[in-house]
Image (tube, rainbow, N blue to C red):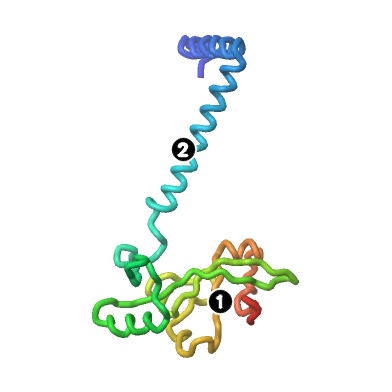
């Protein structure tokens, strides 16, 4: 920029004038700055939430082909299936759906480094990851074969965030035993 530019000179003169006027009324200036900061912060927070929940596609193979199915009763519209109900539904809809998976939100405790922490997760069927078309970053996902016998060989997958925060991204975590709810 050229210092002798008349537009730059005019802008600097206007900026100095605005600074002097704002300096003469510090209460108004503080209120204006606070209001702007609050408005910008609230708008950013709301947009971040809307973007994460409504605008961004979920990272699965074909999100437009997925649907959630609930058991509806007069008391509650969104009841969950029991596992035997899920098995009956899965087996009875093989000609309708290319795959059916089950999931249930769980809260459990994790024993680690001599301490216990509450962790939230999902108990999922072995078909969960193949139906979503999601691969593991490291190791393997659960497979339909993991559903052969309930509780026969429990498998745990951890999220990327949990892997980074609790295991410092250590790739040697694959294959380690993990105690959840006091069970290995």
Q: In terms of secondary structure, where does tag 1 sit?
A: loop
10 Å crowding of disc 1: few (<14), some (14-19), many (20+): some
116 shown above or below 50: below
- Measured in 3D between alpha carbons, the distance from the residue under mark 1 to the one under mark 2, in whole angstroms, is 38 Å
Q: In terms of secondary structure, where does tag 2 sit?
A: helix
Measured as percent of width and height from the top left, residue 155 is found at 55, 80
Name which quarter of the figure residue 162 lies in.
Answer: bottom right
Q: Which residue is mark 1?
A: 156
In the rendering, which numbered label is found on residue 73?
A: none
**Quadrant that contains the C terminus:** bottom right
157 shown above or below 92: above
113 shown above or below 43: below
What residue is rendered at 28% in x and 76% in y? 97
Residue 130 shows in the view: no
Measured as percent of width and height from the top left, residue 105 is found at 49, 69
Q: Earlier in the sequence, mark 1 or mark 2?
A: 2
What residue is rendered at 37% in x and 74% in y? 131
For the residue pair 82 and 135, the one nearer the viewer reads as 82
Measured as percent of width and height from the top left, residue 107 is found at 56, 69
In the rendering, which numbered label is found on residue 43?
A: 2
What residue is rendered at 60% in x and 67% in y? 119
Measured as percent of width and height from the top left, residue 88 is found at 34, 84
Name which quarter of the figure residue 114 lies in.
Answer: bottom right
What residue is rendered at 51% in x and 11% in y? 14
For the residue pair 162 and 107, the one nearer the viewer reads as 107
Q: Residue furthest right?
A: 114
């Amino acid at each position: 920029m050229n210092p002798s530019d008349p537009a730059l000179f005019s802008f600097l003169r206007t900026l100095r004038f605005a600074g002097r006027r704002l300096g003469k009324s510090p209460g108004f200036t503080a209120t204006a700055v606070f209001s702007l900061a609050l408005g910008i912060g609230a708008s950013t927070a709301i947009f971040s939430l809307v973007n994460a929940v409504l605008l961004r596609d979920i990272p699965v193979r074909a999100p437009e082909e997925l649907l959630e199915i609930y058991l509806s009763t007069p008391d509650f519209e969104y009841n969950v299936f029991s596992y035997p109900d899920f098995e009956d539904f899965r087996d009875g809809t093989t000609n309708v759906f290319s795959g059916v998976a089950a999931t249930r939100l769980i809260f459990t405790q994790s024993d680690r480094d001599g301490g216990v922490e509450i962790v939230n997760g999902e108990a999922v069927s072995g078909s969960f990851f193949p139906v979503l078309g999601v691969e593991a970053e490291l190791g393997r996902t659960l497979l339909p074969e993991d559903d052969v016998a309930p509780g026969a060989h429990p498998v745990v997958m951890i999220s990327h965030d949990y892997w980074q925060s609790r295991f410092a991204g250590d790739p040697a975590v694959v294959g380690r035993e993990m105690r959840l709810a006091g069970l290995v």
